[in-house]
Image (cartoon, grey):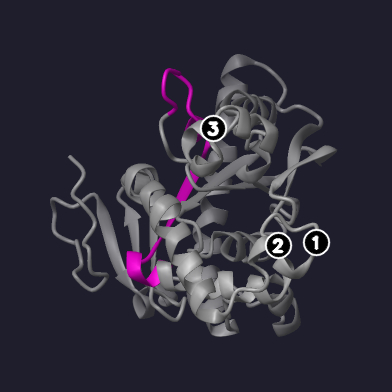
Amino acid sequence: MIIPLPSHPRAAATDAASSYLAFDRRDWAKLRSATPLTLSAAELARLQGLNEKMSLADVTDIFLPLSRLLNLHVAAARGLTQVQDAFLGRPAARAPYVIGIAGSVAVGKSTFARVLRAVLAHWPDHPHVELVTTDGFLYPRDVLEQRNLMGRKGFPESYDLRRMIGFLAELKAGAEAVAAPVYSHQTYDIVPGETQVVRRPDILIFEGLNVLQPTSGSSVFASDFFDFSIYLDADEKVIEGWYIDRFLLLQRTAFQKPSSYFHHYKDLDEAAARDAARGIWSAINLVNLQENIRPTRQRARLVMHKAPDHAVDAIYLRKM
């Protein structure tokens, strides 16, 4: 039986009945051991999101212990593969190690995934690390409009799940090259004819809203192909604030471009822009979080809770 994670990060769920081991930031940071800091301040600055600042202390305290844990998992997974190949009497094969990252809109998944990729790529055992987001597997905008799903974008039914599962299956089967569609946040649509080609990476990070969710009407889920999974968590009102702040920043920058799908918001005053952002959050993103995303949290191997300043303040690691 899975015990629900505490609603407050400091209410640790560490008793014998819990499915997770709970750590505060200080105790988690100690698990870094001797893992060196290989990321520079300049590299980190290039990886950060629009309204999310991360320090090298965050990398040291959070990402280095995580990279050490994942390095140990990758080595163990490769050992198991070698055992099976030896048993079957076939040449040793190496499938990519797949890490799924889930969480709400505006919780910081993209920055987290980019930093994790950079840190993992510095390990000599697995230097080739790729990152693919599920945005590319959204149906094109014209399909969503035909199906009256524009107001449900990001919900499970707005994704081409067959194509997503096919991509992961090919990757795990050891295909030489696998192509994923590319999404543009500027046009709010799939980029016609453009693909991201992934060529047998050591590790693939697969990041998206609903990557841990069971697929309705299918016996195969995206998470079936994951070797490890992470859920980024924060309180709802905190995420809402991040979403509104990001919307206001984009309104002053990206939305000003005529090619932007949200160009019609460019001239709103701040109060009206806040109201618009709050309305989108409440009608779409909060509903998706409550109905589809947060219920998958307990399927993750690792849950990281973020404080209002974006710093991770509590970590929950599923017991083996």
Q: Position of residue 186 (x, y in %)?
A: 74, 56
Query: Which residues make up the magenta segment?
Result: 215-239
Q: Is residue 103 magenta?
A: no
Which residue in the structure is indicated by mark 1?
A: 258
Q: Earlier in the sequence, mark 2 or mark 1?
A: 1
Which mark identifies residue 148?
3
Which residue in the structure is indicated by mark 2?
A: 263
Q: Position of residue 272 (x, y in %)?
A: 51, 74
Observer able to see residue 82: no
Amino acid type at mark 3: Asn
Amino acid type at mark 1: Pro
Gap in angstroms between the C-alphas marked 2 and 1: 6 Å
Q: Nearer the viewer, residue 110 or 148?
A: 148
Residue 13 occupies quadrant: bottom left
**Residue at disc 2, secondary structure:** helix
Q: Position of residue 24 (x, y in %)?
A: 32, 74
